[in-house]
Amino acid sequence: MKQAVRDWVRAARHIAVLSGAGMSAESGVPTFRDAQTGLWAKYRPEDLATPEAFRADPKMVWEWYASRRAKLREVEPNAGHRAIAAFQQRHPGRMTVITQNVDGLHQRAGSAGVLALHGNIAEDKWLDVPKACCDPAATVGHAPPRCPVCGNMRRPGVVWFGEMLPPAELAEAERAAQACELMLVVGTSGMVYPAAGLARTTAGRVVVVNPGESELDDAADAVLRGTAAQLLPYLLDE
Ligand code: BJW
């Protein structure tokens, strides 16, 4: 099957990659639903990655993001990220990277035009709609920083459950899913929508790359049981 998928890669005029946390697992970034350490071991993502969880305990959630940011400064893109970036560089305009990851590793590997559907953990934004008094350079406190006038809090620039995805990125991802002849679905449980829905609505062939079962296996024309760093360099080496 691996050889057949390699042939599909060669033949496809446009390829979309839809990546999830497993894409970065071999860089040392814990996945969400496999993680056995830290807060993920105690809470389900659906309970912790929400505006309600942040409002209930901003210090805890802020500090958890701070610890993840610190760990991300120590990791590097892996062979899977690099294979995707190298393919894009050899074939400009032929591959669109759509990621659910907030870690920036595709971008650091050199991928261009990455559609980061769930935001960027390195950035902050205001929790509530900012007023004239809300100046990011004039915050007080640190976990989280707040507007000294109205108390509005800074929060990580990621998309939590119940929040809209960035509309321009989502629209572009939907266009790429419609236009591609092949979608490589790499390292995602396929449980979180609307991202997972892209693999169900694409007009192209779907290939799942995942060492374990995923919710998108039933939508796939081929399921390759292996890791991103093992399989992508082979599949994209043309
Ligand atoms: C490897 C590997 C290796 C391991 N190589 N693979 C339709 C139906 C039902 C529900 C909904 C629906 N539409 C919307 C919803 C609601 C909700 C949702 O999807 N809920 C589900 C839980 C059912 N979605 C939303 O709320 C989204 N917003 C939205 O829809 O807005 C419109 C709306 C608003 C209000 C009401 C209704 C609609 C927002 C979703 C935001 C998700 N945010 C998070 C957190 C980001 C910030 C942070 O990092 O803290 O995004 S949650 C978390 O899950 C994170 C991930 O991007 C996301 C997906 O996880 P992923 O990547 O799949 O990781 P894992 O850990 O689950 O899986 C890892 C996989 O890798 C495994 O399969 C391993 O086997 C594999 N693997 N090693 C390759 N080496």
Image (spheres, grey):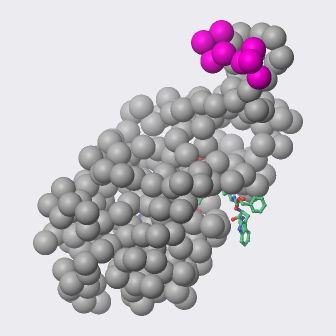
Q: Is residue 6 visible?
A: no
What is the x, y in percent for residue 25?
Answer: 43, 54
What is the x, y in percent for residue 95?
Answer: 30, 66
Q: Residue at x 55, y 81 (%)?
A: 200
Which stretch did the figure color magenta? 131-138
Q: Residue at x 83, y 35 (%)?
A: 55
Asked if residue 136 is among those painted magenta in the image, a careful observer would answer yes
Judge left or right: residue 216 versus residue 23.
right
Asked if residue 153 is among those painted magenta in the image, a careful observer would answer no
Judge left or right: residue 107 versus residue 89.
right
Judge left or right: residue 227 versus residue 58.
left
- Quarter of the figure that contains the N terminus: bottom left
Q: Residue 132's quadrant in the figure?
A: top right
Q: Ligand 1 sits in which quadrant?
A: bottom right
Q: Residue at x 50, y 29 (%)?
A: 70
Residue that extends furthest to the right in the rendered view of this protein? 56
